[in-house]
Amino acid sequence: MSHRPFPGRRSVLRGSLAASAALTLPTALGSAPAFALSGRPKAGWGVQTGDVTCDSGLVWVRSDRPARMIVETSATESFRNARRWRGPLLGADTDFTGTTRLRGLPSGEQIHYRVLLADPDDPRRTGEPVTGTFRTASARRRDGIRFLWSGDLAGQGWGINPDFGGYTIYNAMGALDPDFFLCSGDNIYADGPITSSVALPDGSTWRNITTQEKSKVAETLAEFRGNFRYNLLDDNLKRFNAQVPSIVQWDDHEVTNNWYPGEILGDARYTEKSVDVLASRARQAFSEYFPISTLRRPDGRVYRTVRHGPLLDVFVLDMRTYRNANSTDDQTTDAQGILGAEQLKWLKGELSRSRAVWKVIASDMPLGLVVPDTGDGKPNIEAVAQGDPGAPLGRELQIAELLRFIKHRRITGTVWLTADVHHTSAQHYQPSRAAFTDFEPFWEFVSGPLNAGAFPASALDNTFGPERVFVKAPTASNVSPAGGYQFFGEVDIDGHSGELTVRLREQDGTVLFTQVLQPGRVGQ
């Protein structure tokens, strides 16, 4: 692969850590950063960038008090001839978080940035700058692209374990120097309290860093915000955020397990039973803690297209907000489906207009893997496939419509990436094996979890003819990160040949499976 080397990147990260060492707040067992209102504003939660394109990007920070966000960018680590961007006032209405959009950036270049927080009453009083770096997407095909994806963080009660080194998977991912990281959902587990210790099957003990907001299920806005802050107690994640831009989507656990609009919870842990109320609070916290280009729009939507030069468009789906209620999913008509009519129309239009060589469909749930929802004691379905191997039913009808559209419009280079099921696998979908045949072959790759319980492989539904070419999953349920089975995926697009290579990797970066796809094809 002809991937662009940027030798200054590691040194700027070392400089970033050194400059912010005094800002690193305690992460000992049971502790969390506290507001210290004397002195100057501090940014102890690190920095992030998101939705980076050829000429733009978003920079995020959180202050410990009211402050004006200021971003400076430069082509060099010295910040000579820096360009200054005046960001928003950070206050209690956004939990002291803020995002600044950078425009007019040079394509295919390493951007060094630093965030300063200024006292709103005295702009000369600024805190210690916090630095980071990212690459803009290249407008030149020959430069190639490398990105990673995964999902599912701090799930099933497995939180930040100081004995385990915290979220060490981010160190292995950062070592690959990706252009960006696609998080496929379940960035938090708002429905999953974290206790100080968990007994493991071998008699040892898993220890967690704990916080008040993670001691119960999240219901209030403050509790949802605290769930997002919890993950930022991990130094591995903060280093990664300062090094690698993100493209973030959500799934269910940002709100509660297997949720859908209009649901009324029967879970005794909740005093607020309306999922719509919980989702509104969760969405606000989600928009405050991630740099996402569409969440500040009037419609506040998660689904969007992130264009990454001539080689790649990423179509970020939201299979949560517009879905119908979970059911047995065997209805013979289903206009709403899992995407909703408006999102399906948007996706068709964006795919038709895309001129990128590769069109990655970032799906927060798999297509042909059966994901049940038995929370209320009924055999309901959480994802798309319901286990009936025959003609499309329920939510499969909407996916069949999309796959038919891709075939008949001869849209090339589609690849599906997902997480959700807490194992890693590669599925090839083929009409000759399927009950529904009006589509071209395609691949779906599954990765995750990042730091959560691992689960056995899901059953396949033959409606779209999936063949599981590779899988690694435990035989037991809810295997802790100490037992392994934590995964991420890598995608390399070669700038010369246009070939796309997928590698499924373990927590330490070990490659488990590799698949090479050829450009310019409707089906693979």
Image: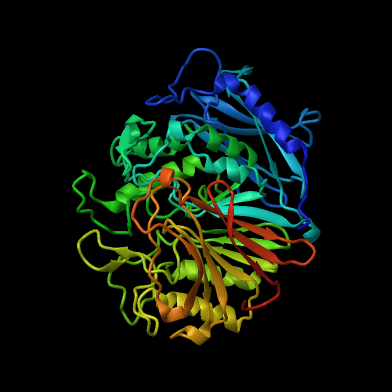
- Give x and y (percent) for residue 223: 34, 37
Question: At x 73% / y 62%, what residue is drawn?
Answer: 310
Query: Where 302 falls versus 483 (above or below)?
Result: below
Relative to 305, say whether 271 is above or below.
above
Query: Where the C terminus falls, by quadrant?
Result: bottom right
Q: Quadrant of the N terminus?
A: bottom right
Task: From the top left corner, tell me how far across and down residue 211 is, in percent.
Answer: 36, 30
Residue nearer the viewer, 312 or 462? 462
Residue at x-position 69% and y-position 27%? 15
Q: Residue at x 34, y 56 (%)?
A: 476
Query: Within the image, what quadrant is residue 193 found in?
Result: top left
Using residue 273 as the reference point, say whether residue 172 is left or right of it: right
Mark yes or no: residue 84 visible. no
Where residue 189 sits: x, y (%)? 37, 45
Q: Identify whether 56 is placed above or below 310.
A: above
Closer to us: 298 or 277: 277
